[in-house]
């Protein structure tokens, strides 16, 4: 019974799939002799199941297996880095805003309200327009785009903690705002930050790949799953696997991350947090 | 009695709109390089009198607040400047693109709400494995990026089954009739509806779960009214409130999907306009698009709050 429950856990599947992909990346030279950017005029548009290229090749003769594997570190980084960065920033803003209150709270939250007036993708597009298209800028853009949501969630949590007895006790004992914030409030908002942040990892993977798909993220010759979907989309009528396989892989990984985050929410029952954000 | 609430809410919205305008104006100012290098060719940039004349005529030598006020008064008059790419008036481009997006979004919204509510009710009232699947499916669907859905649907219905067109808004040959536009709208609208429908289903199922244990439900149940009738007559109308409150979020999520859906299906809407404007560094178009879309969302959210305060007697001044 316990074995079955472990098997059903999204964390187990996440570990298997993402672990497998990371292992594949480290073993990429053993898996395929072709590099992700190797152009081979004699191997153009090979179908699935071809010798040497089990998933086929694209219009430049580049091997799809090696290109999918080359996208692994980019996609994993694209999920974890923005989710962590925006949750960390959101936690700082939310804690300060919620605990200090007064004009500081009003200014910070008005700023967040202005950012929240933009739909997620619009804020990301605006950030890319200013910063320019690159992988790092795409990650910064999605970090900014998700920030107001995180700051709001942590602020709400902080407000509910501020009047607790142990905080009052610390205040009466003469603790200053910084020590209360770091010593008493931060540890108590961490579960919420962890749950919301882990759900966002999958969404950030999808969002960054989305910017790459729009030509605003990873730039050639670098590859990620978004650029593969974009390039493969041109050949959907003759070689659908070129777009559909990276689509399936991207969907699988982001779904597993979101399900794992949701599982964490159920385990840490009582933790407040936003629902899934859509990309 | 509710006037006080509405006034406060309106003041907050106006404040947010002010912030949005400052952000959109300031954002383009943060771009490295100045308008001179963007709009004038290399040879003209070396021509000092021409550059000076250019800066003077565009007011670039004025202090930033003066430039901001000038920009805002132009926008208030409907003048968004000209595209750096096509030299067309940005206002005209926007009008065309917004109407195309509205065609897509209105069909998507109708689909999303009707399917989402039915789905939520089914998930809440069906037991067993079917109910379980209906309950967990929205979370899975919400985590799949909409462009992946679009490509998969396009492959199945346009390439494989050859039932529907997968690109553009009208057929290149003999196109343009209402039926032709409708045929082109089906795939993008269905793709667009998937995420908001899942969100609506989740919200509806969650609210129904809470409501069915409420006292008023127990009362009508005790009065001998059958469960099905209670669900439809008493519980469902109450379950609509959270859908209304969340409609701001729903519309926002629809815009995000719409950008990707338009890119996948080559739909000539605001989304594809913004993408090519960002790619081509066409700043007047980026500015106008961002400002207009954000303004629409502020207004949508204000309307939602106003409606909600009218519907829900618990909100007082």
Image: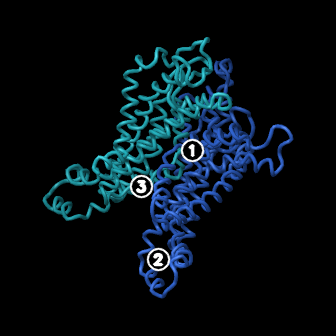
Chain colours: A cyan, B blue
> Relative to B267, is A133 above or below?
above
Q: CA distance from mark 1 to mark 3?
A: 20 Å
Q: Residues within 10 Å of mark 3 (few under 14, many from 20)?
A: few
Q: Quadrant of residue B33?
A: top right
Instruction: Say which chain tag 2 marks.
Output: B
Which element is circle 1 on?
helix
Q: Which residue is situated farthest in the front direction here?
A: A1
Q: Earlier in the sequence, mark 2 or mark 1?
A: 1
Q: Are marks 1 and 3 in contact (CB under 8 Å)?
A: no
The residue located at (14%, 57%) in the rendering is A174
Closer to the camera: disc 1 or disc 3?
1
In front: label 3 or label 2: 3
Q: In this rendering, would A241 be left or right of B8?
A: right
Residues behind callouts 2 and 1 on a single chain: yes
Q: Look at the numbered discs 2 and 1 and tell me whether their residues touch, using CB distance below 8 Å.
A: no
Q: Which residue is mark 2?
A: B314
Tell me if B75 is positioned left or right of B18 in this view: right
Q: Is residue A268 left or right of residue B76?
A: left
Please give the chain letter of the residue carrying mark 1. Answer: B
| Residue B159: image location, x then y, percent | 69, 37
Q: CA distance from mark 3 to mark 2?
A: 24 Å
Residue corresponding to mark 1: B146
Where in the figure is residue B269, as x and y percent of width and height? 69, 44
Q: Secondary structure at mark 2?
A: loop
Q: Which residue is mark 3?
A: A274
Residue A33 visible from this viewpoint? yes
């Amino acid at each position: 019974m316990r074995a079955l429950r472990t098997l059903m856990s999204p964390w187990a599947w996440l570990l298997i799939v993402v672990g497998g992909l990371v292992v594949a990346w480290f073993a990429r030279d053993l898996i395929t002799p072709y590099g992700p950017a190797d152009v081979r005029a004699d191997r153009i548009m090979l179908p699935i199941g071809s010798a040497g290229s089990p998933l086929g090749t694209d219009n430049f003769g580049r091997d799809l297996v090696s290109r999918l594997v080359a996208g692994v570190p980019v996609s994993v980084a694209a999920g974890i880095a923005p989710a962590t960065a925006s949750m960390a920033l959101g936690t700082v803003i939310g804690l300060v805003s919620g605990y200090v209150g007064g004009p500081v709270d009003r200014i910070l939250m008005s700023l967040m309200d202005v950012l929240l007036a933009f739909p997620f993708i619009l804020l990301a597009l605006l950030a890319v327009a200013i910063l320019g298209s690159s992988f790092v800028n795409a990650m910064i853009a999605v970090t900014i785009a998700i920030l107001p949501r995180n700051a709001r969630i942590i602020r709400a949590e902080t407000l509910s903690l501020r009047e607790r007895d142990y905080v009052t006790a610390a205040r009466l004992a003469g603790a200053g705002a910084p020590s209360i914030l770091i010593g008493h409030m931060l540890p108590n908002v961490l579960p919420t930050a962890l749950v919301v942040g882990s759900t966002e990892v999958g969404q950030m993977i999808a969002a960054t790949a989305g910017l790459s798909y729009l030509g605003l993220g990873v730039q050639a010759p670098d590859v990620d799953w978004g650029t593969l979907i974009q390039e493969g989309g041109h050949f959907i009528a003759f070689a659908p696997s070129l777009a559909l396989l990276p689509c399936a892989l991207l969907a699988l990984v982001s779904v597993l991350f979101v399900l794992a985050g949701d599982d964490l929410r159920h385990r840490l029952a009582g933790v407040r947090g936003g629902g899934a954000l859509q990309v | 009695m509710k006037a006080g609430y509405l006034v406060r809410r309106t003041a907050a919205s106006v404040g947010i709109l002010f912030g949005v305008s400052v952000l959109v104006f300031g954002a383009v100012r943060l771009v490295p390089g100045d308008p001179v290098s963007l709009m004038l060719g290399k040879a003209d940039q070396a021509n000092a009198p021409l550059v000076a004349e250019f800066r003077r005529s565009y007011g670039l030598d004025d202090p930033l607040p003066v430039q901001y006020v000038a920009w805002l008064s132009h926008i208030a008059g409907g003048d968004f400047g000209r595209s750096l790419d096509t030299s067309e008036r940005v206002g005209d481009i926007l009008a065309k693109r917004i109407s195309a997006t509205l065609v897509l979004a209105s069909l998507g919204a109708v689909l999303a709400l009707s399917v989402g509510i039915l789905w939520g009710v089914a998930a809440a009232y069906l037991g067993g494995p079917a109910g379980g699947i209906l309950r967990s499916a929205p979370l899975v669907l919400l985590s799949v990026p909409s462009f992946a859905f679009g490509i998969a649907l396009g492959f199945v219905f346009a390439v494989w089954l050859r039932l529907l067109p997968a690109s553009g808004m009208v057929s290149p040959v003999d196109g343009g009739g209402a039926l032709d536009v409708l045929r082109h709208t089906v795939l993008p609208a269905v793709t667009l509806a998937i995420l908001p429908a899942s969100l609506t289903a989740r919200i509806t199922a969650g609210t129904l779960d809470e409501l069915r244990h409420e006292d008023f439900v127990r009362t009508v149940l005790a009065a001998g009214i059958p469960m099905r009738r209670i669900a439809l007559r008493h519980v469902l109308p109450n379950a609509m409130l959270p859908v209304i409150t969340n409609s701001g979020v729903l519309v926002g999520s629809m815009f995000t999907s719409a950008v990707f859906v338009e890119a996948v299906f080559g739909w000539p809407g605001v989304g594809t306009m913004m993408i090519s404007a960002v790619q081509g560094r066409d700043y007047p178009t980026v500015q106008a698009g961002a400002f207009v879309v954000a303004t629409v969302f502020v207004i949508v959210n204000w309307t939602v709050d106003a409606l909600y305060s009218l519907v829900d007697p618990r909100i007082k001044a």
